């Protein structure tokens, strides 16, 4: 599986990373090198193996339903690059 | 002998005996940082006022006889740990202005135990790298020099390069670090100090900027194995705020350092070698095995057949998780924003400007391997291979108590080397990644010098949540190796 | 009667599947300890976890899990003892982490069934595919500033249950009945308040059309419809639109559409080329959710009686008609009200008063049964006053009207207004005599065989007695005096 320039652009767009046209070829080259190297996994026989999803082999612990957090809007908003009163602000979204 | 020759354990004794004040100790380290950090760049942010205030509080506690396990001990905190009121950058431009309003659980545990924070240590951007060259705040210099080529600037390894360089150069008595695929152990090896990645789940991940959630694990870097044990004892513990944190008691790791290895079965995995690995690393490995045999351990040849697939698996799993973990850096709630013609353009410009090339590359790889049509071929397959890697370890640990391997396939390289090809760089982690994939604990211990006079580490791997055996074996290697070489650039030299 | 759209090329059938997003009733959010109250000041119910600050991690809320399990049990669905959380990745400003934690491959609840009732008295069984837990997003306000959207994250991270139906629904009416039934079950369970105005229940409507006997054609998803009436309208107009597209030789594209309730049309959302590549993968911050079977069993034992069994009981135990029983169980509060009124009394009278006079009065006032000025206890007392002949049925209507106005005890109203019925035969005799004396011609007609005039005499006597005469006694005296 080898990436073409259109795929590089599509992936960058999915990841919301701007890629200049002049960068595409080099990125394509780098990504293909890495993906080509990763292909060695195709040698491994994984028939009947259950995927290992996480780092910990335990069941999920549950917390009690108690309000213990929130109520600090100023701290939540303090790092915002743009805020409008009690809101975060972004360029207008058209649906 | 200067104050900088004291280990953490020794400094603690001096402080408790009131032969040394925390302020004096902290001020000395701050002075050393002021002198050497401009060159080494081990710290991104130094916080002298806070450090001195904490030192004064430590002295007050010591005066009252209320010393905690780390009261007055000056530490460096990897700039991946969120620290309340102190800028936390993750080595990235995207978080250049980010001041967290909260303290990570691990750093909070250290503060609880009385530690003094000198500042925030440099690292590869978002902990993605093996050389500390990807930091947006500049490369870190390894304080060690090649004998024949003292002008070459060596890398400290990565991603915890700032932490390792700071400890090695004696700009801190110890440091926090994190390890996702080798980011504690490889820099420890490169900088001639010990460092341990504990079992996944041993330390809380809460408040640590996430790279790859199923792999990230905090651990200490310090001057000695015992110092690491003391620090880990404070850092570790169950945290209900992290669903992957293990609800287990924290053993007395420092006591385990004194156990010795008599009667232990230590495995030698035959797969831990690679083409082009310097002969002296193989020789050191054999030396390590001989030390263990002499100390009463039984050496057992074992096989971890999927070792060679660890790295490729890692380079699917870690970027996949990272691509999602780093989606929150979008210029809306915190961090850098680059304005654009619309929201989408803002996102794309912000993330292009805020992330460096290696982070961008990994996000793209991760996005690709999760995308429709490729998920099964890459991500699911990688998870299956990950299951096989874990099975390898599980089977081997039914036969042996610990494993001994080299930490890295080379000594520290120079800035600029290995930079042409990402895979060449990735290969640095070939011996550390499998334990990360399996979640088992691993420690690097300095064991010798190569022909250039650069330190080399040996890696001890243990069973899940059996860090005690890892410390016992590591301390035995440390004693046998008698590693006393020091880097040429260091405080008190 | 099957719902059919008659097109130019023949009859079309509508195929609908619904995804109901139901906000879970819980004090705190699914993965954080921030509060969930509706209508709080912007960004006040936001933790650093909800705002996806660096290093923040999710921890699951036990009550949210219990609510999902209870809902699954209420939908007669399979509870999956092991389920997983996945990340659904997409960028949107009200989705702070850039992914929604949801359950994609292994939901907490599997297949179930819901019975729906239709206006013609028939019932249908609609399949439930699954129910899963997920996080709600924050709120984007697009109308506060000419060039900016504002983001409020109070809702971000509140637990949602997504209940997905099979494409078993075949008409707007069935879509409405399905939603009504789902909402009724959720309210009975107390797992969601079902309040569509406040957005605590929303529906995505998947619509396609086909000729009879065909396999499914391409469907469109109409997003975020926020009332049952709009869902029914959306099904209708979207199906019609698709028929027109197919019949004009076009193709329906699989896409997401919005229902414009003001204009009564659906329109395409600004399409995004990557809208459907969500890159789901297991959330590495969470572990598999493993339910303790004893806990699930305890939740099952603790379930309230749900609408269907209650309805069956009302029919079996009280002898109510299926229709009346259905009306009474639709809301738990109504069923409880009815049962309180009916307890120890004539059940049919109780049902008639609740579904008749009471519902009419509430409708007029635009009130719910919880806000009824007439309490169940007082309505019961009114029935008692009739049963023991203190008042007659005619007067009871007046007393009820007074109860609606004042909320007073019916006995007090009867006493204060002197409405006790008259059983004194002397008074009745006098009234009858007066009426007969005033209408000699009608008396003659009656005696000549015009039996129908009897009702006229009753009416006149009652009128003379201000409605308070005991109807049986009035009849008896009239009969005697007219014979």
Image: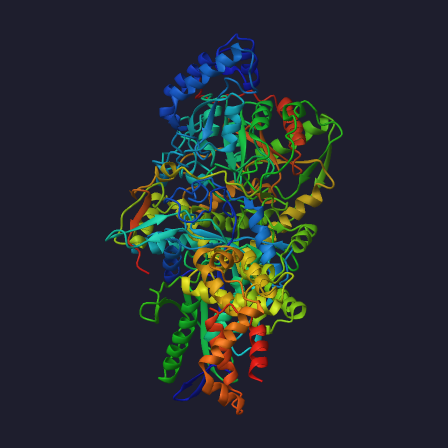
Most foreground residue, C304 or C385: C385
> Residue lying furthest right in this view?
B263
Q: Is B123 left, or right, of A19 in this rendering?
A: right
Q: Which residue is drawn at 35% across and 47% down?
A: B351
Residue B388 screen position, x and y as percent? 64, 51
> Residue lying furthest bottom in this view?
C448
Q: Residue at x 37, y 77 (%)?
A: C241
Most foreground residue, C218 or B408: C218
- Colour scheme in the image? rainbow
Residue C357 visible in image: yes
Residue C151 screen position, x and y as percent? 35, 49
Q: Residue at x 56, y 9 (%)?
A: B17
Residue C385 screen position, x and y as percent? 57, 62
Q: State how many labels appear.
A: 0
Please say if B111 is above or below A2. Answer: above
Residue C103 visible in image: no
Residue B135: image quadrant is: top left
Residue C72 screen position, x and y as percent? 60, 59
- Quadrant in the picture for the C terminus of chain B: top left
> Residue lying furthest top in this view?
B19
Please say if C384 is above or below C454. Answer: above
Q: Is B319 left, or right, of B482 in this rendering?
A: left
Please say if A85 is above or below C220. Answer: above
Most foreground residue, B62 or C329: C329
């Amino acid at each position: 599986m080898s990436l073409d320039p259109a795929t590089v652009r599509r992936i960058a767009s999915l990841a919301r990373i701007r890629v200049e046209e002049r960068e595409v070829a080099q990125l394509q080259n780098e990504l293909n090198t890495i993906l080509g190297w990763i292909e060695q996994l195709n040698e491994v026989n994984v028939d009947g193996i259950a995927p290992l999803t996480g780092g910990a082999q335990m069941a999920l612990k549950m917390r009690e339903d108690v309000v213990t957090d929130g109520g600090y809007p100023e701290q939540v908003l303090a790092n915002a690059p743009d805020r409008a009163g009690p809101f975060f602000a972004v360029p207008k979204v058209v649906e | 002998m200067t104050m900088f020759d004291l280990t953490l354990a020794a400094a603690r004794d001096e402080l408790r005996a009131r032969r040394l004040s925390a302020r004096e100790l902290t001020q000395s380290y701050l002075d050393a940082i002021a002198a050497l950090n401009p060159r080494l760049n081990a710290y991104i942010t130094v916080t002298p006022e806070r450090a001195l205030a904490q030192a004064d509080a430590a002295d007050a506690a010591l005066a009252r006889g209320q010393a905690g396990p780390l009261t007055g001990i000056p530490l460096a905190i990897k700039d991946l740990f969120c620290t309340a009121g102190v800028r936390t950058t993750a080595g990235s431009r995207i978080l250049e202005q980010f001041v967290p309003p909260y303290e990570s659980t691990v750093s909070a545990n250290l503060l609880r135990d009385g530690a003094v924070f000198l500042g925030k240590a440099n690292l590869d951007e978002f902990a993605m790298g093996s050389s500390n060259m990807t930091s947006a705040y500049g490369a870190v210099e390894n304080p060690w020099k090649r004998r024949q080529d003292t002008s070459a600037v060596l890398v400290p390894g990565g991603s915890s390069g700032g932490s390792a360089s700071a400890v090695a150069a004696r700009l801190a008595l110890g440091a926090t670090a994190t390890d996702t695929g080798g980011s504690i152990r490889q820099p420890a090896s490169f900088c001639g100090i010990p460092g341990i990645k504990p079992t996944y789940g041993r330390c809380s991940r809460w408040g640590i900027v996430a790279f790859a959630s199923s792999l990230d694990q905090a651990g200490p870097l310090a001057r000695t194995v015992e110092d690491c044990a003391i620090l880990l004892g404070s850092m570790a513990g169950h945290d209900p705020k992290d669903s992957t944190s293990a609800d287990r008691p924290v053993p007395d790791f420092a006591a385990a350092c004194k156990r010795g290895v008599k009667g232990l079965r230590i495995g030698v995995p035959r797969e831990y070698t690679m083409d082009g690995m310097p002969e002296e690393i193989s020789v050191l490995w054999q030396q390590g095995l001989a030390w263990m045999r002499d100390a009463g351990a039984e050496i057992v040849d074992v096989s971890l057949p999927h070792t060679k697939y660890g790295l490729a698996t890692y380079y699917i799993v870690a970027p996949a998780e990272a691509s999602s973990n780093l989606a929150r850096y979008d210029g809306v709630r915190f961090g850098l924003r680059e304005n654009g013609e619309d929201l989408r353009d803002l996102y794309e410009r912000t993330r292009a400007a805020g992330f460096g090339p290696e982070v961008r590359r990994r996000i793209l790889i991760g996005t690709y391997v999760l995308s429709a049509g490729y998920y099964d071929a890459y991500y699911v397959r990688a998870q299956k291979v990950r299951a096989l890697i874990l099975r390898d370890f599980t089977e081997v640990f039914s036969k042996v108590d610990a494993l001994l391997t080299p930490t890295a396939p080379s000594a520290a390289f120079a800035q600029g080397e290995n930079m042409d090809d990402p895979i060449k760089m990735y290969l640095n982690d070939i011996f550390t990644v499998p334990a990360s994939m399996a979640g088992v604990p691993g420690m690097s211990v300095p064991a010798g010098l190569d022909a250039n006079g650069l330190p080399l580490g040996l890696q001890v791997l243990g069973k899940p949540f059996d860090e005690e055996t890892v410390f016992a074996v590591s301390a035995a290697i440390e004693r046998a190796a008698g590693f006393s070489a020091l880097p040429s650039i260091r405080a008190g030299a | 009667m099957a719902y059919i759209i008659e097109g130019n090329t023949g009859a079309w059938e509508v195929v609908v599947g619904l995804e109901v997003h139901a906000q879970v009733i819980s004090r705190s959010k699914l993965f954080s300890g921030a509060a969930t109250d509706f209508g709080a000041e912007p960004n006040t119910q936001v933790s650093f976890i909800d705002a996806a600050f660096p290093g923040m991690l999710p921890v699951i809320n036990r009550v949210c899990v219990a609510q999902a399990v209870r809902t699954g049990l209420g939908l007669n669905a399979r509870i999956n003892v092991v389920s997983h959380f996945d990340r659904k990745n997409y960028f949107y400003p009200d989705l702070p982490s850039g992914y929604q934690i949801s359950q994609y491959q292994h939901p907490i609840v599997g297949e179930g069934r819901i019975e729906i009732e239709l206006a013609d008295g028939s019932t249908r069984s609609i399949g439930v595919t699954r129910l899963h837990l997920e996080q709600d997003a924050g709120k984007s306000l697009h109308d506060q500033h000419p060039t900016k959207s504002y983001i409020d994250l109070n809702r971000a991270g509140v637990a949602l249950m997504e209940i997905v139906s099979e494409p078993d629904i075949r008409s707007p009416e069935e879509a409405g009945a399905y939603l009504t039934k789902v909402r009724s079950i959720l309210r009975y369970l107390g797992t969601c308040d079902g309040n569509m105005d406040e957005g605590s229940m929303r529906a995505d409507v998947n619509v396609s059309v086909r000729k009879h006997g065909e396999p499914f054609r391409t469907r469109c998803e109409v997003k975020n419809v926020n009332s049952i009436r709009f869902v029914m309208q959306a099904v209708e107009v979207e199906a019609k639109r698709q028929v027109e597209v197919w019949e004009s030789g076009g193709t329906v594209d699989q896409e997401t559409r919005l229902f414009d309730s003001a204009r009564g049309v659906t329109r395409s959302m600004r399409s995004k080329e990557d809208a459907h590549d969500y890159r789901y993968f297991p959330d590495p911050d969470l572990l598999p959710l493993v339910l303790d079977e004893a806990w699930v069993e305890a939740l099952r034992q603790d379930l309230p009686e749900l609408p269907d069994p209650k309805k069956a009981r009302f029919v079996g135990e009280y002898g109510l008609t299926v229709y009346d029983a259905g009306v009474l169980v639709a809301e738990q509060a109504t069923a409880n009200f009815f049962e309180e009124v009916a307890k120890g009394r004539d059940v049919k009278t109780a049902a008639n008063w609740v579904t008749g006079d009471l519902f009419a009065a509430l409708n007029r006032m635009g009130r719910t049964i919880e806000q009824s000025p007439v309490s169940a206890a007082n309505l019961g007392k009114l029935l008692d006053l009739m049963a023991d002949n203190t008042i007659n049925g005619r007067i009871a209507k007046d007393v009820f009207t007074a109860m609606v106005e004042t909320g007073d005890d019916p006995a007090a109203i009867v006493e204060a207004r002197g409405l006790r019925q008259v059983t004194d035969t002397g008074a009745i005799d006098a009234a009858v005599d007066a009426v007969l004396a005033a209408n000699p011609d009608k008396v003659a007609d009656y005696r000549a065989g015009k039996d129908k005039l009897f009702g006229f005499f009753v009416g006149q006597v009652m009128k003379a007695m201000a409605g308070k005469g005991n109807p049986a006694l009035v009849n008896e005296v009239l009969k005697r005096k007219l014979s």
